[in-house]
Amino acid sequence: MLFPVGSLWLAAVLALAFCTSASADDVLFENVRIFDGRSATLSAPSHVLVKGNVIEHISAAPIAAADAQRVAGNGYTLMPGLIDNHWHAMLVRVTPAQAFGDVGYNNLLAGNEATDTLMRGFTTVRDVGGPVFGLKRAIDEGIVKGPRIYPSGAMITVTSGHGDFRQLTDLPRTIGGMLTRMEQVGGAMVADSPDEVRLRAREQLMQGASQVKLTAGGGVSSPFSPVDVTTFTEAELRAAVEAAENWGTYVAAHAFTPAAIQRAVAAGVKCIEHGMLMDEATARLLAEKGIWLSLQPLPEDLRLGFPEGSVQRAKADEVWPGIARSYEFARKYKIKTAWGTDVLFSRALAQQQGAILASLTRWYTPAEALVMATSTNAELLALSGKRNPYPGKLGVVEQGALADLLLVDGNPLDNINLIADPANNFKIIMKDGVIYKNTLSK
């Protein structure tokens, strides 16, 4: 079990570097306009009292709180922290070759990226594949500054499926034999029968997964999985669904094509990741069944990042035209749609996280896009039930909600591009009642 050992080592090293952890004090925001995560307009000038890690009171009248730290809001916008529902915390900064290499180095790199993620205003991410349990623990314990993480752990794939990054020299696979490096570090697990799928799903749940991630069809970045293939059988998918439901949570399935999506839905999967090659009949199916669609407005720079002439570039060229069509289907049929970025292997693209969110205005109003990245994304997170690592209400500014808040210089409902420049426009970033950034005094 190499990764848990690496996780403990990471925690010990970073504990020496960051000797104290942040704690929440009462904070009173005065004279702010509120975007509550649901509405298309801002509130009248208001006051918001955060007590501990919870929003205790919201009032148009001044709030008496003698012992609270006072923040002069100056009419700025107070809004919920942003949520990215398709993130890979361990795969942003590394190269594909590094991804299954030195565990200690990769954790330190991911910890640094996690801090940057939080400083971009993303207070929560749903991690849909990668050995992230140690990083999550370090963040939760205050050793590393970063967002809340809803972890899937290792993505579960079939031999040759999306997520199978083994080399041909790793074949043939011996059932019950030695695990490959990819599996040892917890990046992805290969499972080729219902029993193996059930085992691998249970292993992720045992380590603290809030949901289980399978790859039900081919993908772009993997070397041996054509986009058009359908991978897991329905029986294999049902085994994962059964294991997740026994733990009170759900399965999210990577799937592009109608065949892969429809098989996943038939097996009981509750959330489809991507879905960019769906047809209209499949869109209607998702709407009728109330299945979540976790869709991403993938930037052109991500497609162009694959070398011209490579297998991955050819697959990206096949998938990218479907992005707009999928968003149009999502709107037409009122599919429950979550938002995420799916940034891989690029720190530069990760720094555009807010800009990728802002690009949703190709299909949605700024208010609709921001609602999606706050309260709607929080609804999907809540699907993990008792496996939710952060019980409480996220994605909204309302009494009793967890205090993940951004103070924005300007009105993002009028100018959503404010979120593309968090360094200048986010004056305060608060997570769990703790202020991690405050530039009001500068």
Image (spheres, rainbow, N blue to C red):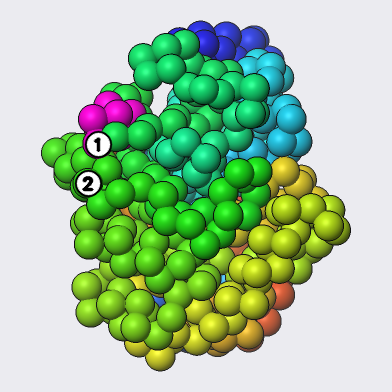
- Magenta includes 309? no
Considering only vertical position in the picture, is 3 above or below 402? above
Could you tell me which residue is drawn at 31 percent across and 67 percent down?
262
Q: Main secondary structure of the magenta part?
A: helix
Which one is earlier in the sequence, the residue at label 1 or at label 2? 1
Amino acid tagged 1: Pro
Could you tell me which residue is drawn at 36 percent across and 52 percent down?
252
Position of residue 92 in the picture relative to residue 27 (left or right): right
Position of residue 42 in the picture relative to residue 213 (left or right): right
Could you tell me which residue is drawn at 76 percent across and 47 percent down?
346
Residue corresponding to mark 2: 235
Residue corresponding to mark 1: 194
Q: Position of residue 63 (x, y in %)?
A: 39, 63
- What span is colored magenta in the figure? 194-200
Considering only vertical position in the picture, is 33 above or below 20? below
Determine crowd level at label 1: few under 14, some 14-19, many 20+ residues with C-alpha closer than 10 A: some
Position of residue 288 in the picture relative to residue 9 (left or right): left
- Element class at badge 2: helix
Q: Are marks 1 and 2 in contact (CB under 8 Å)?
A: yes
Q: In the picture, which quadrant includes the N terminus? A: top left
